[in-house]
Structure formats: C-alpha cells, structure tokens
Amino acid sequence: MTGIDLYGSVHKAQRARLFALVVAAGRTDPHDDAAAAQVAAVAAALAAELHEHGEHEDQFIHPLLARYAPELAASLAAEHRDLDGALAALTRAAARREPAGAESLHRVACRFTATYLAHLEREEGESMPALWAHATQDELAGVLVAFRSARTELENVTSLLGQLATLTPREAATMVAAAFDPATLYETRELLTGLLPAPQLAALHDSWPGARNG
Ligand SMILES: [Fe+2]
C-alpha cells in the first residue's frame, strides 16, 4: 500500500538546490570576490537547512520508523550523523576563500551531493516503503501534522513555495490545495505566477476564483 509520502516533495526541492549549487560553484571565478561570496552564502545556507532537515526527520519520522523497522531507523540515524560531518565540511569550504592548493567549493559540493543523493534514495526506497507496509495512514498523517505544528506558519509557507516549482503539476496543485483556501490562493496569484512554470501554474488555475475571467 502506498499513501502519504513523507519524503518526496521536500527531497525534490533539495536535489534541485544542490544541483543549482554545483552548477553555480563550478562556474564562479574564485577571484571574483562578490560572485564567490554569493555562491559561498548559498552553500552555507543550504548546509544549515539540510542539517535542520535531518534533525526534523530524526524527531518526527524516526520514532514511527523505529516502531516498525528499528534496524533501518538506526541505520538512517547513523547516516544523519555522518551527513552532519559532510555538511560541516561543506560549511568550512564555503567559509574559506579558496587559498591556493585548497579544494574548491565546487568539488566539495559535488562530493556532498553524491553522498546526499544516496541517502535520499535509501529514505525514499527503503524507509518510505517500510512505513507504507506497516504504518497506518493516520500515523503517517500524524507525522505531517506534528511537524507542521512545530513550525511557524511563515516557515511552512516558505517551505511550500520553495518546493512548488520542483513538483509535477498534479503534486503542486495537491499541495497548494491542502495548504491554502481558494480565496487565499487567489490573493497569492501574482507571486505564484512569477514563481511557477506554466504547467504547474495551469494546474492551479481551477482553484483561483475568477481567474478564468480575470
Ligand atoms: Fe534524511
């Protein structure tokens, strides 16, 4: 049985941002101080966010996973600890200004991305199927409710907006419909128009009162 996916949408956005970081770091001239500082700031912010994301999974997903697949939960928790070391290396690489002989931010970001992709594959390919096999839909929904309740409304909306452009049109429409009432959604139409690719935007149109006429 499948159902509520605890990983898919947020992981799509994380992959997109890691790939963008790798491309940006690869084309940035390390002697261009402004450009180097900009890509370093992006790397540091993403490293901090991914560390926090791992903590959220430890806190909200792993207790449920440990109930049904304790060895897998322990293994993924250990990977999170290892990833923290890799994230610290990424943060250090972002903080230094690439002195001669130092490994480039681009290479560190590539290595971290390779490690992180393998971790996401285990969560989506092992953890989520284990939860679908054993947990109830109410338990899975409870994880989402507990997570969202622990964050501010602004954090939840910011996270949602950051994911929309990386989702399929159907996924984007489903998530927006669950998060906003139609009137609020209509109020955000200009923001979403600037944020989303045309297919994703078209999938939301039916939720916009008057959008067909306006
Ligand atoms: Fe994780």
Image (cartoon, rainbow, N blue to C red):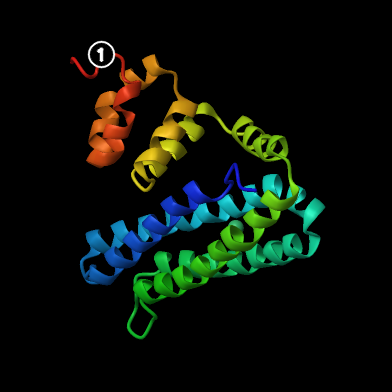
Report how many numbered discs are placed on residues in the image. 1
Q: Circle 1 sits on which residue?
A: 210
Q: Which residue occupies the foreground of this view, 183 or 170?
A: 170
Residue placed most toward the observer, 65 or 45: 65
- Tell me the quarter of the picture where residue 140 sits: top right
What residue is drawn where x is 49% and y is 53%?
11
Residue at figure coordinates x 29%, y 26% from the top left: 205
Residue in the image at 74% along x and 53% along y: 65
Kindly give the residue lying farthest to the front in the view shown: 1
Q: Quadrant of ligand 1?
A: bottom right
* Residue 73 drawn at (x, y percent): 73, 60
Q: Pick out the residue farthest to the left.
A: 214
Q: Which image quadrant: the C terminus?
A: top left
x, y percent for residue 161: 39, 37
Where residue 187 appears, as percent x and y from the top left, is 32, 18
Of residues 39 and 154, the one nearer the viewer is: 154
Is residue 71 rendered to the left or right of residue 39?
right
Q: Position of residue 125 (x, y in %)?
A: 59, 62
Res 60 → quadrant: top right
Q: Is residue 171 above or below residue 101?
A: above
Instruction: Decide: few, some or many residues near mark 1? Use Cα within 10 Å; few <14, some 14-19, many ≥20.
Output: few
Q: Nearer the viewer, residue 107 or 207?
A: 207
